Image (tube, grey):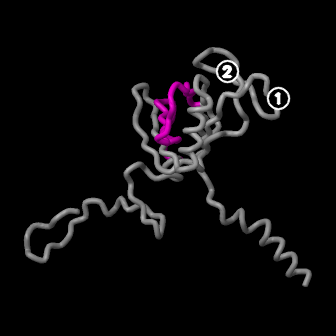
Amino acid sequence: MKSLWVFALWLLFVAPGAVAKQRHCVFRVHAQANSQDTAVFATSVHAQLSGKDVAIEKIPRISEHDVVPFYPYAAANGTYGVLFQLDEHGRIALDALSIERRGSLLFVFINGRPITELAIDKRVSDGKICIASGLTAADIDLMKKDWRLIGQKVDYFTGNSLAFLARRPIANVHGDKARHW
């Protein structure tokens, strides 16, 4: 009986951690906080845009759990940029931030590194965040492990990419040339 209780406790505490999906890339967007907030809610960072020390919220408003697909591209300075498409939760959070915090800054961190600051100057309701540059090829490789590329089809039954199906020839029963779909 004692071993049954030990097994039940093990299932309760250890098994959920084994089932959770391990993330490879950490993506966090923090909003600028009130400078009067205590150290419990905010921390101070040096803003590149203004050159001043500003307070940012410790809890991110948008995280890697809000990203669905992304699109990487090569930037002019030898680094990479990326466009993130957010899910419904992330889209609503970004829309609310762009309304409530107009005139303030958003601070983007990827894998613990500060990547960029975004000035909020208008409402953003499309759920897209564009990072112009500052990412490495290693960052992009880690992102590919977590999220699909924009435009890449996904089999919703297995979760696998359907990119291998693109431009597969279909046999034609009439003897004509093979068609592509």
Q: On the image, numbered disc 1 is attached to which residue?
A: 38
The residue positioned 46% from the left and 66% from the top of the image is: 156
Q: Is residue 137 magenta?
A: yes
For label 2, the crowd category at 10 Å Cα-Cα, with few meaning under 14, some 14 to 19 and many 20 or more, is few
Q: Farthest front residue?
A: 99
| Magenta-highlighted residues | 115-142
Q: Where does the N terminus fall, quadrant-wise?
A: bottom right
Amino acid at dot 1: Thr
Point out the frontmost of discs 2 and 1: 1
Total label count?
A: 2
Q: Position of residue 3 (x, y in %)?
A: 88, 80
Q: Nearer the viewer, residue 136 or 23?
A: 23
| Inter-mark Cα distance, 2 to 1 | 17 Å
Q: Where does the C terminus fall, quadrant-wise?
A: bottom left
Q: On the image, numbered disc 2 is attached to which residue?
A: 46
Q: Is residue 174 left or right of residue 50?
A: left
Q: Nearer the viewer, residue 132 or 66?
A: 66
